Image: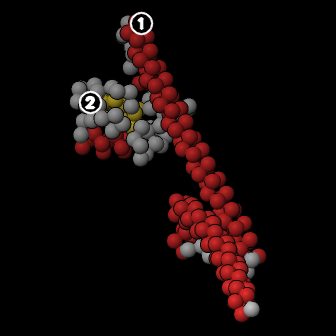
Amino acid sequence: MDSLICNFPKCRKELDTFAWVTSCSHIFCDDDGSEQFSKAMKCPACDTVVSGRFDIIRVDLKPSEQYKSMVLAGLKPDIVMEICTRSLSFWTYQTHHEKSYQEYVANKAKERSVQLENYYEQINQWRTTEVVFLGQGQNLEVPAVLCDNNEIYFLLYFQYFLIFSAAKKELEAAKKKYNEASEKLMEKSRQNQKLQVF
């Protein structure tokens, strides 16, 4: 990661000039930091109260050479090393934070991809069924509410359509059996009448 990212969820732009850093290890762009901390002394990323004197600082991410020469001048080496260690820990935390966010985004994209794949598979099944129905001289229309890429409505409608189709086939088969039984009964009735005549 070459540059840090604003931790404000609605922003997430790369930071390259000034930024706001909090004691809870979050960083924000100059615009969002100024706006959020003017409203409340609370971290916008984790809601930690940052009311202490050094809980929030505005830093220049591109300091001048003179600043870099003077900022740690006069401090003992162990203090300099401690400051550097904390600074590296902050960078490590931000790197881990960004990695976790990117993994979350990737997982969401994968889930969406699977949903779309299932959706278009259902559409393909629907079209195949439609072709079969057209081959049988029947018309199959998709309701207007399903034409807005609404997967849930489409899938529910498709499932109910399959159930309805199966029920319709069973009804037609039952009617056929009823008609056959009626014809047999009528035939037997005619035969009985003939026998009674003799």
In the displayed structure, does residue 124 sit left or right of residue 102?
right
Percent x, y of residue 142: 60, 73
Percent x, y of residue 32: 36, 43
Rendered view: 167 above or below 8? below
Residue farthest to the bottom, as pictured: 197
Residue at image position (29%, 27%) is: 55
Dot 2 alpha-carbon crowd within 10 angstroms: few under 14, some 14 to 19, many 20 or more: some
Residue at image position (34%, 29%) is: 22
Q: Which residue is mark 1?
A: 77
Percent x, y of residue 185: 67, 81
The reply to whether residue 129 is in sight is yes
Dot 1 alpha-carbon crowd within 10 angstroms: few under 14, some 14 to 19, many 20 or more: few
Q: Quadrant of residue 186?
A: bottom right
Image quarter of the N terminus: top right
In the displayed structure, does residue 108 sit left or right of residue 172?
left
Residue at image position (75%, 77%) is: 136
Residue at image position (55%, 36%) is: 103
Q: Amino acid at mark 2?
A: Val
Report the colour scheme: secondary structure
Mark 2 residue element: loop
